[in-house]
Amino acid sequence: MLVFVLYLLIVGAGTGGELCVSRAMKAVGEVKDFRPAALVRVIGRALRVPWMWAGLSLMGTAFFSLLAVLSRENVSLVVPVTALSYGAGALGGKFFLGERVTARRWAGVLLVCIGVAVVFLGQR
Amino acid sequence: MNSFAGLHFKTYLLIFLMVIFGPLGNVLLGKGMKRIGMVSIGTQAETIDFLSHVLRSGTIWLGIGSLIIFFVANMLVLSWADYSYVQPASSAAYAISALLAHFLLHEVVTPMRWTGVLLICLGVLVVGRTPPRTTESM
């Protein structure tokens, strides 16, 4: 049961965290100036958006859950499960960020999902 | 360069940086930690000793630097591109890791792993043929 909760946290909190970071960056607006001083200002602005902190906290939770699972299960089992993040990411993009996830993008996400699982199952 | 081509160019460039510096950072951190070896951090003195080893490791600093570049590139690209585009596109890192393992480290990459890499590349190609941005800023 605990391992199931940890998997849920890895996929849910990990993807949720990245979605929150994405939302924060959309609030900051499109970056057009890539000079170092401008980039520092962008990062400063991003750190003032609450979504960024929510995202970083969730990503931290997912990271420590991953460490906890890795102390109990083999990497070859854990990583294919985390490939579910790609499906969760596309769903989150559609419903949380309002992105238009077309059938073609879903097909690509599905191929990546299967590919990541196969890569890790193929590590002997 | 028109804005459409410019958007694609900067999206591809930043995803390229993520794909290179993400796995590189992980490899460097792993190498650095292996060099330090098994550590015990039961007492305060042991923890300080461990941290001083970590902070004196050039490999670990390079790893941290690589991961910072990865994270900043990720933040920047998400300021305009869809998350549902960036996430699968950056999975090309798995393919890069397998290629580096095979050609630079001369590791054995099993046929099954190559199959997975091929599926990921196909997935990235399919996602890459969708528009990077389908929303306006929030």
Image: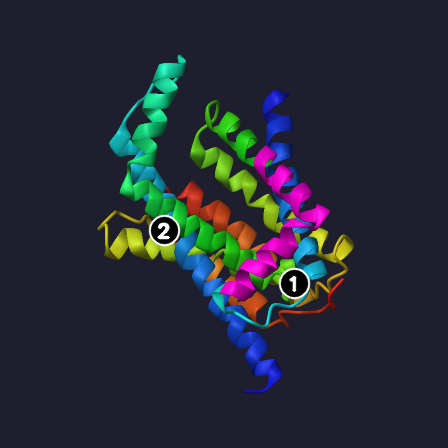
Tell me the subunit letter for badge 1: B
Amino acid type, callout 2: Leu
- Residue A7, located in which quarter of the rendered image? top right
User: Does the magenta segment cover residue A43?
Assistant: yes
- Residue A99, located in which quarter of the rendered image? bottom right
Q: Residue furthest top?
A: B43
- At mark 1, the secondary structure is loop
Of residues B64 and A89, the one nearer the viewer is B64
Q: Residue at x 70, y 66 (%)?
A: A102
Q: Residue furthest bottom?
A: B1
Real-space Cα distance between discs 2 and 1?
24 Å
Asked whether the residues under the numbered discs 2 and 1 touch, taking CB atoms below 8 Å apart as contact, a structural biologist would say: no
Residue B94 visible (yes or no): no
Of residues A74 and B14, the one nearer the viewer is B14
Are dots 2 and 1 on a single chain? yes
User: Percent x, y for residue B60?
Assistant: 33, 41
User: Percent x, y for residue B137?
Assistant: 73, 66
Span shown in magenta: A37-61
Asked if residue A83 lies left or right of residue B33, the reply is right
- Residue B82 has which mark? 1
- At mark 2, the secondary structure is helix
Tell me the subunit letter for badge 2: B
Q: Residue at x 34, y 38 (%)?
A: B30
User: Does the magenta segment cover residue B50?
Assistant: no
Q: Is residue B102 above or below residue A13?
A: below
User: Percent x, y for residue B90?
Assistant: 51, 58
Q: Is residue B77 above or below residue A12?
A: below
- Residue B24 has which mark? 2
- Predominant SS along the magenta part: helix
Asked if residue B31 lies left or right of residue A59, the reply is left
Residue B15 visible (yes or no): yes
